[in-house]
Amino acid sequence: MAIIERPAPTLPAIVTPTTTYGVLKRPVSATGWRSWVFTVDHKKLGIMYGATAMFFFIVGGVEALLIRLQLAAPNGKVLNADLYNQMFTMHATTMVFLFVMPMAAGFANYFVPLQIGARDVAFPRLNAFGFWAFLFGGIFLNMAWFLGGAADGGWFMYAPNSGPVFSPTNGVDFWALGLQITGIASLTGAINLIITVLNMRAPGMSLMRMPIFTWMITVVQFLLLFAVPVITVALFLLSFQRNFGAQFFDVAAGADPLLWQHLFWIFGHPEVYILILPSFGIVSEVLPVFSRKPLFGYPFVVFSGAAIGFVGWGVWAHHMFASGLGPVSVAVFSLTTMAIAVPTGVKIINWTLTMWGGKLWFTTAMKFAIGLIVLFTVGGLSGVTHAVAPSDTQQTDTYYIVAHFHYVLFGGAVLGIFSGFYYWWPKVFGKMLNEKLGSWNFWLMVIGLNLTFGPMHILGLQGQPRRMYQWTEARAGEGFFNFAFWNLVASIGSFILAVGILLFLINVVITARNPQKAPLDPWNARSLEWMTTNPPKEHNFDVIPTVHHLDDFFHQKYEEDATTHIMTQVRTAEEIMAEQERNAEKHIHMPSPSYWPIVLAFGLPVITFGLIYSHLISVIGGVIVLFAAYGWALESSTAPDSDFENNSPGSGLDKVTANHD
Amino acid sequence: MTDVIHGHASSTGISNVKLGMWAFLGSECLLFGGLISTYMLYRGRVTGGPRPSQIFDIPFTSVSSFVLLMSSLTMVLAVSAAHKDDDRKINLWLTVTALLGATFVGGQVYEFTAFYKEGLGFSTSLFGSSFYTLTGFHGVHVTVGIIMLMSLVGILKRSSVPGKKAEVVEMIGLYWHFVDIVWIIIFTLVYLIPV
Amino acid sequence: MTTNTADTTHEKQHGMSDAGYIRIAIILAAITGLEVSTYYVDFGVLFLPALLIMMVIKFVMVVSYFMHLKFDNKMFSFLFYAGLVLAVGVYAAFLATFKFFIQ
Ligand code: HEM
Ligand SMILES: [Cu+2]
């Protein structure tokens, strides 16, 4: 590939205001910590989501290792029963709400606007608010560790375990209120991305030309939009019960403890798709690029994703087969659950056929994507075995369930995320992650995860219950089915897995130190996010692209011969970029940084903290929120055009006359 | 003459804010749906204290429901005035709407006090817990609406709001009507259908 | 700020005059009156269906006219009704698992 000399742009396409006024003077710094803390740029926020989620991944990972240390041998002494309960509860809560969800939000934030040819999201300040609410919510959740003990009722927090009798510390209060805050973050993020996708696509980017990643993210945002309020209700009921003496789950007062279970799982099952679909989207981008073929059956992948999102609302009670729902409910939910395996299977078939006959390029990203297909399928199959209610009543609350959801979540969601890291790292940071280390990273993770979670199938079917803080030699079983052996294997596996992840972190550091820049289009990619610099400029595109095809970037580089149907390269990415820079649009006013998102988000944990300790503190939090809300309402998202003027290139000539907004 | 290009403009001409508001209201359907369902499940479960039919004062609640319903009319008149850019009428109708809303909330406070005196506390029974939670959530929504209306009146007097004035009025209007339709459901399911 | 042309298009877009809104409000008030009358007059078997139908009519009228959903872009309707229909479906199923409808 010839490197084309790029003409130095004569004028910066983007103008930034130097001074600007809302209620107070607005922040304007383009560098330093201020440029991050007050930013509304979707790319910076995407990175912030990613980094924070990675931190929580490590926290949740350490918790998991402690659990495996405890169970490595009979009569484990690492943790006592109480601490063990806190550990598995917070492990799951952290992984689900503070790692996978925000990591997906990070990918979505960064890439959805780029993939649809937009310069930012619909509500940039709301976007910043969502990040800060997530961060503060996550911190708030974990504060409980230092204030008497963390939540200990399991991540689904069934009544009556969640009540003050069985959970006397403030742990559950921190849990319920912290999840409210992260819920607000998810809800605002969902609204933001939905509107961005509906309303800000580049010309020609019809829905059926949208990259699959963007599609899956859109489905996920609809799931969030409608599932978050359900858990909001459940968490409010729980908090009211614990803090204000309501009776919602008090059986003595005639309450039905299943109320909580229903509300939790009406949210909870859509939630599992919220966790997996972003990764499905990522591998649907990665597989075609590294198979050098378009995605097989694009419309099927889109519609099966939407179908999963829809049917996912009608299966929740499969988590409650053992709770005495009654035969009719069990039969109905068993059938719907089996039905949902169909669209999932469609996706697996499409991915396989995408690779079929392709010129496969086994980069690390590709390996992780293939790993997802294989391991997710294993998890999907065990899922079908517990869709069958009679067999589920044997499996439920055993390690077999733990095996299932770790295959779908680690083998599925997490491998997809890592595939995304390796694929998009050059786009985000302008440097390639080391492929050799990547290969080690991949194999150690895959081996580690199979060693950790594979044996749990056996342990579970042998009857090892989940959430028991010790197992004893007396019940360990004989020969092949010996608990001791498989528990030890699982524990060793978990440390191999941890080393694999550590290699990734080392890779990140090595890559950061490596001065070598990534090429413009390292993978010969297909979608619009690659049609810009690495990393992208603040305004993403010099010219908003006009889209003519699915995989538009690919079609700009390649043309099809009418008779032979062979695609030949007609232009390089460098040429396309050079042309964009020549035609760069000028006077782009990007949304301006703002103080209010972080201030508003900060008010939330203050309010919830006060609900636990002293209502006076809540009042202070309320005042902060109200104050920030006014500040927010009184400034416009983009600083007024006049603020840009003195800084505008060639000012004077371009007195702005059009009055926008 | 150069046109300024805004980094987060809509490409369809439909307002981002309005779409966002409707998405939010769609989401709110599941919030209130959950609260209403919880109430429906628990309305008859009274182990102590009064039953619903023993304490509901239908004539009183009918009047306050009517007041809230009419506040939707005054709200829509404010929106209509905003589209005609008639500042005086905007102010008038927004204020009237806020007053009607405040009347409704006042009625609710009165009702809660009366119920409490008749022996229905938050922890008296499942009926009490779920009734106060549902209607309390609605009341908080109305209160937030009133605060927004009053703030808007204040801001309009002082200066101009960022963005299009008519759109801001319309958004608050959508929120307000939503709160009203939730009450339409609550009025029937909670009050008029006896248990 | 907005120009005159914008105003005339708005008028069309919303398809309602102030008098129209008042008419709607009168109908809503009348239905409410009818609803309240069920408290005083015995409607027999019609009681429950009548109340529910009147509730739905009021709901739809406010949404369609006061909230302009009838005249506005279809995307708004989609976002709202998706949530509404989902809520009704899911919570009805939820109540059904408690045998709520066959008490
Ligand atoms: C082929 C599709 C799937 C089927 C048929 C299926 C079926 C099931 C069933 C019936 C259960 C309840 C088992 C019990 O508790 O007794 C379950 C649990 C679970 N599933 Fe799946 N599942 C599928 C895919 C997924 C996916 C994609 C995820 C997430 C990415 C997932 C995550 C979970 C989790 C987290 C649990 C355990 C919840 C808990 O008890 O803590 N599943 N699955
Ligand atoms: Cu499920």
Image (tube, grey):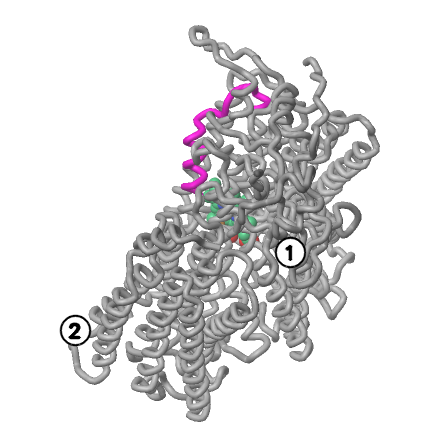
Q: How many marks?
A: 2
Mark 2 and mark 1: Cα distance apart in space: 52 Å
Q: Residue furthest bottom?
A: B117
* Residue beneath the point at 62% across and 40% down: A654
Of the two numbered discs 2 and 1 in the rendering, the one whose residue sits closer to the viewer: 1
The local secondary structure at tag 2 comes to helix
Residue most extreme to the front? A652
Main SS, magenta residues: helix
Q: Is residue A302 left or right of residue A603?
A: left
In the rendered image, residue B171, in percent from the top left (x then y), is placed at: 45, 61
Q: Which residue is mark 1?
A: A134
Disc 2 residue crowd, few under 14, some 14–19, many 20+, Cα 10 Å: few
Nearer the observer, A17 or A58: A17
Could you tell me if residue A535 is visible in this image? yes
Residue nearest the observer in this picture, A301 or A653? A653
Q: In the image, which residues are magenta? A: A289-308
Q: Position of residue B142 (x, y in %)?
A: 45, 73
Q: Is residue A394 above or below residue C21?
A: above
